Amino acid sequence: MALQSLNPATGENVAHYDEHDGGTVDEMIDRAVNAFDLHRERSFSDRADKMLHAADLLERRSEEFGRVMTQEMGKPIDQAVAEARKCALVCRYYARHAKEFLRDEPAGIDDVRAFVAFEPLGPILAVMPWNFPFWQVFRFASPALMAGNVALLKHASNVSGCALAIENVLREAGFNQDEFQTLLVSSDRVDGLIADPRIRAATLTGSVGAGRAVAASAGKAIKPSVMELGGSDPFIVLSDANMERAVEIGVTARMQNNGQSCIAAKRFIIEDSAFDEFVPQFVNRIEALRVGDPMDPDTDVGPVASSGALEVIHDQVQRAVADDARIRTGGTVLDRPGFFYAPTVLDGVEPGTVAFEEEIFGPVASVISARDVDHAVTLANDTRFGLGGAVFTEDREKGERVARQLEVGCAFVNEMVKSDPRLPFGGVKESGYGRELSRFGIREFVNVKTIWIA
């Protein structure tokens, strides 16, 4: 069986990749186990030298890697190049801080030497998505490798070229070829991989459905796991907000990566007294976006990743209209080659309807009216998701108060939700569990081990 990559801007085939058979995968896992025995004994400085070399390669070849991303999943080229460069940041962050984060911690018990050690687990399986095909992998791989683990990547089938490019970067940087390996396998083989006793833990970034399946498999095998799943992030605009800034950031927060981001702003909750000021400006800015070839630096919004994704988005918009939502702009599949959806704004969205309850993973914004700040918080939290959230107000104390009330893993005031290597990233409720990035991320896949010496 072959894994296929299509160019979403044209619908044309990019490449086919032969799937690894069972015997090949078995050998790769064996090699990972053997590599772990050596890698775990390497010093932090040795691992850091390699990780810093990887960072240099990512920066130096960012335009090359950006083209690979854009060709396989359609993000605008400038965003793809920026993604490769952001991967360099997380590599450097863990190269410089892993030793500090995993240093033995004295327990302070009288008359004995007692401390906590942080030791690597072994081969970690990463099941990664297509929407940020480099960043999602490196934000897992850099802390995992720096902690002394080894990695097996099962990437989304449509970005196999990205997966192999990442593997080559790490090998060129000096990591042993068996310390990071790409498994070219279909999703239906993930359960068997997790059940394999040689795999010590699993992490997934993806949909809620995929998260349920992988988390269930990890639970059955009694293995640690981290789940970063979907989101329906609220973007609250209060009456005292800087409207020009809120509009400008709101457009970017919704339409970046062609609207295909778990932490994209999806539900725009606007205080009544600001509604008529914010929404027309927001719609005008959405209508001014340039939709087109993602390889063109002037393009703002490219295609969605697949024909199936296009169908799902349009079906959700049509069902939203059936729920009495109004299309302020967009709402159509664009008549051109590839998988393009018009940037869309839905008004009149209410709790209990499709556009409020479901995650629309594409360039569609839902606008919702709130009576006041308390009502805005209630609406924001009225969701099964809890990944990120943002609030815009000129009163920073009020902004912090709202941020603390949001049931999310990360809350931002007067800024869009974003990930940063220095801060933990992850969600609550059906947006998942566990954390990536910062000191919390590198400690997800280590044995937190008590040592007592009398």
Image (cartoon, grey):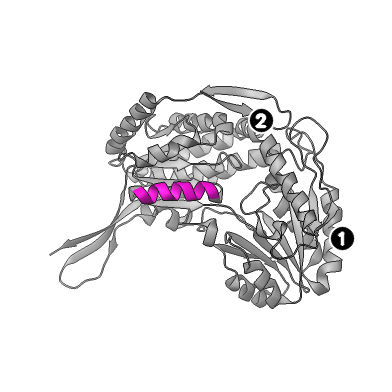
Question: Would you say residue 250 sits in the magenta stretch?
Answer: no
Q: Residue at x 53, y 30 (%)?
A: 165
Neighbours of disc 1 within 10 Å: few (<14), some (14-19), many (20+): few
Classify residue 81 as left or right of residue 10: left
Give the answer, above or below, for where 233 lies relative to 180: below
Classify residue 358 as left or right of residue 137: right
Q: In the drawing, what numbered circle is on residue 71? A: 2
Q: Residue at x 18, y 62 (%)?
A: 452
Where, by quadrant of the figure, is residue 200 drawn? Answer: top left
What amino acid is found at the position of numbered circle 1 in the picture? Pro
Residue 444 or residue 102, whichever sits in front: 444
Residue 263 or residue 309, whichever sits in front: 309
Q: What kind of element bears circle 1?
A: helix
Q: Residue at x 77, y 42 (%)?
A: 341
- Provide the residue designation for mark 1: 280
Report if the CB atoms under discs 1 and 2 are less than 8 Å apart: no
Query: Does the rendering let one see residue 323?
Result: yes
